[in-house]
Amino acid sequence: MTPFRISFCCTNTDPEPWLAGLRTALPQADVAVWQPGAAQADVAVVWMPPQAFFDEQPQLKAIFNIGAGVDALLKLRLPPQAVVVRLEDAGMAVQMAEYVCQAVIRQFRDLNAYADDVHAGHWTYYPPRQRRDFPVGVMGLGVLGARVAQALAHFEFPVLGWSQTPKQLDGVRGFHGPAQFHDFLASSRVLVNLLPLTPETANILNRDTLSRLQPGGYVINVARGAHLVDEDLLALIHSGQLVGALLDVFRTEPLPAEHPFWREPRITLTPHTSARTLREDSIAQIVGKIAAMARGESVAGRVDVGRGY
Ligand code: NAP
Ligand code: GLV
């Protein structure tokens, strides 16, 4: 591979271990943290970079996003010739599967109620539920959603999936497109959101859609905060239409102290941690794709900028 320059521009990320990993794997590359006025780079490794980065780096050939979601990146003006590549799995899918499965199982097995009872010194029993009464709908059957759906199917929950285009996954009843969306919702009791945030999917978890879930509905949002209309979720929980929610992502992060989600006991919050970027896996994936591009091969995980994911 001929010498080339990589510019690293990642918000909320300690750059040193990334630089060390990239330099070890790509000794022929000049790898540096971007500073205003820096020399032109060939490749960018980014997470929520400022617009100034792209304004000053118009010759980039490839932009690697060190996350699966590219919604923040696609809000910026990018060099039109640059290929945008996101992380595909890189250790996130198994994390997402364990996070969602534990949440579904906690609901199904009344484990929160048991924990409260035991804490209060009570030895109580709840009637066992039937799995057939606990269908789980997964919105988005991409790299993460497909893994989550299949992990849920492994626990023998009835699993439904909704995607843009038709998908066939063992143990998962597939729905696709806007025409099948309401049937998908009406067939689900627990709703898991793993859609990318695009103009089509913003605010998709709202009063109308969430009201269509089966009685006892529960919402798990692990995709992006802007998918959810916060007031609609609260109203549906307060009215008893939904029993609760698990939220990992928010319109503003960190979640502001005054937000009512903090004070609603039927909503469980986690700080955007359901599937973390794993540095070693991510560097290995990015380095593999840089090498493939240098050989003139096409790489998976290329973002369709027009489509938004
Ligand atoms: P992906 O592989 O691109 O999959 C996206 C899925 O959504 C695809 O199945 C796609 O359908 C479907 N989809 C997109 N637009 C749709 C629409 N309008 N209607 C119906 N289905 C639609 O993405 P991924 O890697 O699984 O990641 C999903 C999202 O998870 C990311 O975008 C990110 O926001 C979020 N995420 C969150 C965390 C966290 O820690 N909370 C971590 C990683 C990722 P087709 O397959 O038919 O195209
Ligand atoms: C995290 O939210 C990601 O998109 O990887």
Image: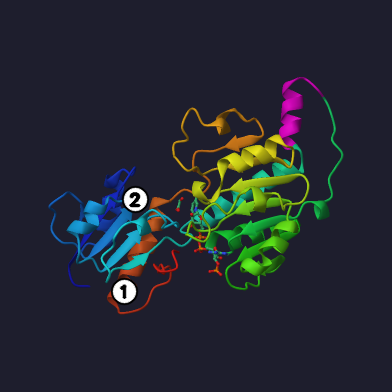
Amino acid type of the residue that numbered disc 2 sits on in the rendered structure = Met
Which label lies toward us, 2 or 1?
Answer: 2
Is residue 281 positioned above or below 258 on the image?
below
| Mark 2 or mark 1, earlier in chain | 2
Predominant secondary structure, magenta span: helix
The residue that disc 1 covers is 293
Q: Nearer the viewer, residue 48 or 4?
A: 48
Q: Position of residue 180 (x, y in %)?
A: 68, 67
Specify whether tag 1 is near ligand 1 (CB below 8 Å).
Answer: no
Q: Quadrant of residue 151?
A: bottom right
Q: Is residue 69 left or right of residue 289?
A: right
Q: Position of residue 173 (x, y in %)?
A: 72, 66
Colouring convention used in this rendered image of the protein: rainbow
Amino acid type of the residue that numbered disc 1 sits on in the rendered structure = Met
Q: Position of residue 199 (x, y in %)?
A: 47, 59
Is residue 212 positioned above or below 267 on the image?
below
Q: Residue at x 22, y 73 (%)?
A: 1
Q: Residue furthest front?
A: 208
Q: Residue at x 46, y 58 (%)?
A: 90
The quadrant in which the C terminus is found is bottom left
Q: Which mark is residue 48?
A: 2
Q: Which residues are magenta?
A: 111-122
Q: Nearer the viewer, residue 145 or 70?
A: 70
Label 2 – label 1 distance at C-alpha: 23 Å
Mark 2 nearby-residue class (10 Å; few <14, some 14–19, many ≥20): some
Is residue 232 positioned above or below 227 on the image?
above
